[in-house]
Image (cartoon, grey):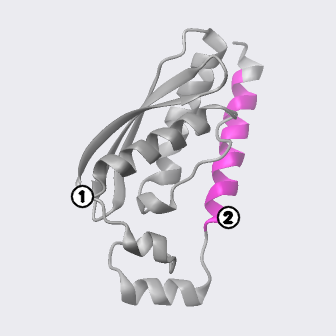
Amino acid sequence: MTTLKKKIIVTIAGISVTFIISSCQTTDKESEQSRYSSNSGVNSSSSTAIEEASYADGVYEATGQYGSLPSSITVTVTLVDEVITDVKVTPHATNPTSLDLQRSFAAAVPQVVVGKRIDEVKVGRLAGSSGTPDGFNDAIEQIKEQANS
């Protein structure tokens, strides 16, 4: 991969992360409610589905599939009080371009999901990768099933 392409990918990754983070900001009222309803530092949603789900603390792993080939990535998540405290994405691609995209995604995703409740996590296009997020979201759904207590 040329230096220019790498710079473009890094720039797009930075813009993507900035956009995702800025779109996740809360209003003052939501922040105030969150401060009084939870001391985890993560905004809680008023959705009934989120409140009904209960996930056991632990380390969970799943392989998410995506695309027509299919492609896959392995996602390892640590949950504490239903909040993702650590995440690791292991790429499986053999094609150099796909592997670069999976690696860029793997490097960018912790900044987006660590500190979030697992029920709030659904990743879109990130770090120039449009397919890898589908595999990540598939793995998160599997992990939610594993952790559901």
**Which is more toward the observer, 141 or 130?**
141
The answer to which of 59 and 86 lies nearer the viewer is 59
Residue kind at label 1, given as amino acid type: Ala
Residue 57 on the magenta segment: no
Query: Residue 95 location in percent, x, y?
Result: 61, 9
Visible in this render: residue 99? yes
Which residue is the site of mark 1? Answer: 56
Q: What residue lies at 61% left-to-right and 10% top-to-bottom?
A: 96
Distance of label 2 from label 1 (alpha carbons): 28 Å
Q: Give the residues drawn in magenta, as a range.
A: 6-24
Q: Dot 2, how many residues are within 10 Å of its Cα: few (below 14), some (14-19), or many (20+)?
A: few
Q: Disc 2 vs disc 1: which is toward the camera? A: 1
- Amino acid type, mark 2: Ser
Q: Position of residue 87 (x, y in %)?
A: 38, 43
Label 1: which secondary element: loop
Residue 125 falls in image quadrant: top right
Image point (62%, 25%), residue name: 101
Q: Which residue is mark 2?
A: 23
Q: Does 17 appear in magenta?
A: yes
Q: Which one is earlier in the sequence, the residue at label 2 or at label 1?
A: 2
Question: Which SS type dominates the magenta stretch?
Answer: helix
Residue 43: in sight, yes or no? no
Residue at left 77%, top 21%?
A: 4
